[in-house]
Amino acid sequence: MSSDSLVIIPTFNEKGNIENITRKVMSLEGNFHLIIIDDGSPDGTADIVKELMKEFNGRLFIIERQGKQGLGTAYIAGFRWALEHGYEYIFEMDADFSHNPDDLIRLKAACVNGADLAVGSRYVKGGHIAKWDRKRVIMSYFASIYVRMVLWMNVKDTTAGFKCYRRRVLEAIHFDDIHFIGYAFQIEMKYRTYRKGFKIVEVPITFTDRLVGVSKMSGKIFKEAIFGVLKMRFIKVR
């Protein structure tokens, strides 16, 4: 069954979420396709996906990789696959329901109506964060302000990971030039999109902390983002 829309979800030990998130995406209007990029989850995440592929034949796909290779490389693997298979709208989304799958429809609509990159934003009017403590919210908010100040980029939620790209954006970005593979990857992709003159639109969403499983965030990942932004300021975008 053909589609113009592909959702990319990287996974590592998402056994508790993967079937529910898959079924939810498959149930949406618009015939979304879904590809899982699994980094050798020892909990059997990939086995669940492969069983679901029998039910959602031609709409659900998987790329299995050995070991944890980083969020950025997982998405790049998905981007390459999406471009090879002719998709027009390519989405990034987490497996843990911190991103509401229903918002995929709104992100796509933003791109259909003129955006080159639609960002699910917590920090524009109408955006919210649910079930985070005050300290975490403040840290995230001021991290985005820091990024905007350093990069002079007019995007309020610079670290957001819920996005829809038009095909032409990914075709214009040289994936081999991407510097960061962790948290800073999300910032770098927006920055490269911005530097190339593409139109970025922020769509308000409610971000909810995961209910099942363990967060992949760490001090090392956060440090990469903070110091990586300074390096990013001097990236030469081809």
Image (spheres, rainbow, N blue to C red):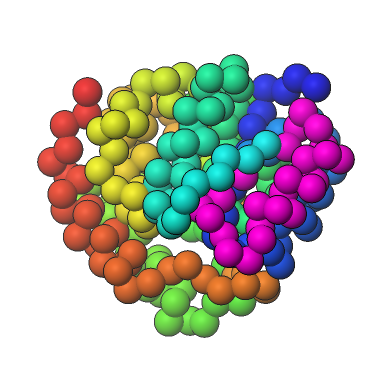
> Front-most of 168 and 61?
61
Q: Is residue 55 above or below residue 220?
A: above
- Residue 214 location, quadrant: bottom right
**The magenta stretch spans residue 59:** yes
* 89 shown above or below 18: above
Give me the residue at 47% from left, 42% from top.
Answer: 75
Percent from the top left, x then y, of residue 193? 36, 32
Quadrant housing the N terminus: top right
Q: Is residue 86 left or right of residue 222?
A: right
Residue 220, position in %: x, y? 30, 69
Question: Percent x, y for residue 161?
Answer: 49, 51
| Left or right: where 95 falls relative to 49 | left
Which residue corresponds to the image point at 53% horizontal and 55% vertical from the top-left? 40
In the rendered image, is residue 157 in sight? no
Q: Which residues are magenta?
A: 36-60
Q: Where residue 172 sits: x, y (%)? A: 37, 21
Left or right relative to 29: residue 190: left
Q: Is residue 135 magenta?
A: no
Where 225 falls versus 28 (above or below)? below
Q: Dividing the picture into quarters, in which one does residue 207 lie?
A: bottom right
Identify the image quadrant of the C terminus.
top left
**Name of the residue lying farthest toward the left:** 234
Q: Who's the residue at 71% across and 67% down the image?
A: 16
Q: How many marks?
A: 0
